[in-house]
Amino acid sequence: MPRVNANTDLDCPIRDVLDRMGDAWSLLVMLELSRGPCRFNALRRVVDGISQRMLSVTLRHLERDGLVNRRVLPLTPPQVEYSLTTLGFSLIERVEIMRQWAVENQTAVRAARQAYDRRREAVAADT
Amino acid sequence: MPRVNANTDLDCPIRDVLDRMGDAWSLLVMLELSRGPCRFNALRRVVDGISQRMLSVTLRHLERDGLVNRRVLPLTPPQVEYSLTTLGFSLIERVEIMRQWAVENQTAVRAARQAYDRRREAVAADT
DNA sequence: CTGTATCCTGGATGATACTG
DNA sequence: CAGTATCATCCAGGATACAG
């Protein structure tokens, strides 16, 4: 578990973001919520592959950080609606910028990987 | 290990970024290299807490993705200089944007957490 | 429906030792 | 100096069962 170095100017704040950024589930859930409010099981279906446990854990993290709102509707059966907070929207906005980079440069990255792998293969064959 | 859902428009490209973003070491190393070229052991010292192994692994990942250059100087003892590629700079630029968000909103996040924890405490006491 | 509690496993990471 | 190889550990996350 990487600890942040006091020598770098990364220091504390970035850690908090990294904790959310690094967690792919958080991003996926927030991206989904950026489209509009959503209920638990609905999220579960659309964020495919996420386990019930991880959705629960992720949502509580996001709620704790003030990125997501949790609203309980007093019905039977109970309904819980999740939505992005203003803070959440402000973050997802920046995440979108990262996403854009990924879209714009995926070709370059893939090319780099192939070049790298070919190079390594050549070296291996050389041996 | 989160798989990306075809239903979301996240699809493939974001995964690649996430793989680097999620890896805190990658960010720390790249941030460091954004200041200028650096040698292996120098990196090791400045990215405090990173093991030799993880630095090695991280650098190879970054190199493979075309984010970092590796230049071997034919000297004795051998010297290897790492530096960001243009692609690497373009990414770190966006990462900086995320970092900015963290700096700007760290207060809000902390406040949210404290509020959340207090709320939970109240509920617990209530029980 | 919306969760929480347990248990368990794979893969990521660190420690250590060795090499060109 | 700049790594790689191997082994041991630890914890995030999935599966499952239960609860309000």
Image (cartoon, coloured by chain):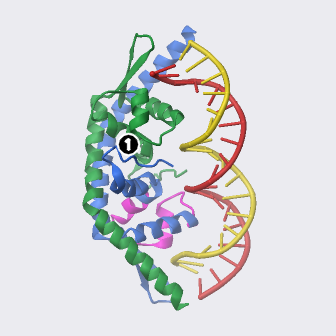
Chain colours: A green, B blue, C red, D yellow
Q: Nearer the viewer, residue A18 or B9?
A: B9
Does residue B94 appear left or right of residue A2 in this picture?
Answer: left
Residue shown at 42% from the left, 46% from the top: A18
Quadrant of the rendered image containing residue A101? bottom left
- Residue A30 visible to the viewer: yes
Crowding near the residue tagged with mark 1, few <14, some 14–19, many ≥20 C-alpha atoms within 10 Å: many
Image location of residue A51, percent across then percent down: 51, 37
Give residue A40's quadrant in the image.
top left
Q: Is residue B89 above or below residue C17?
A: above
Where disc 1 sits, the SS reads helix
Q: Is residue B35 magenta?
A: yes
Residue B17 is inside the magenta segment: no
Residue under the point 33% across and 37% down: A32
In this orientation, which residue lies closer to the viewer: A68 or A8?
Answer: A68
* Residue for badge 1: A27
- Give the residues in magenta: B28-52
Left/right placement of residue A60 relative to residue C9 reads left
**Residue at 26% of width from left, 37% of height from top?**
A90
Q: How many marks?
A: 1
Closer to us: D2 or C13: C13
Up/down of A48 relative to B124, above or below = below
- Percent from the top left, x then y, of residue A66? 37, 29
Q: Position of residue B22 (x, y in %)?
A: 44, 51
Q: What residue is shown at x 42% (from left), y 35% (from top)?
A: A45
- Chain letter of the residue carrying label 1: A
> Disc 1 residue type?
Leu
Q: Give the position of the C terminus of chain A as an image quadrant.
A: bottom right
User: Is residue B37 something that shows in the picture?
Assistant: no
Residue A86 left/right relative to D11? left
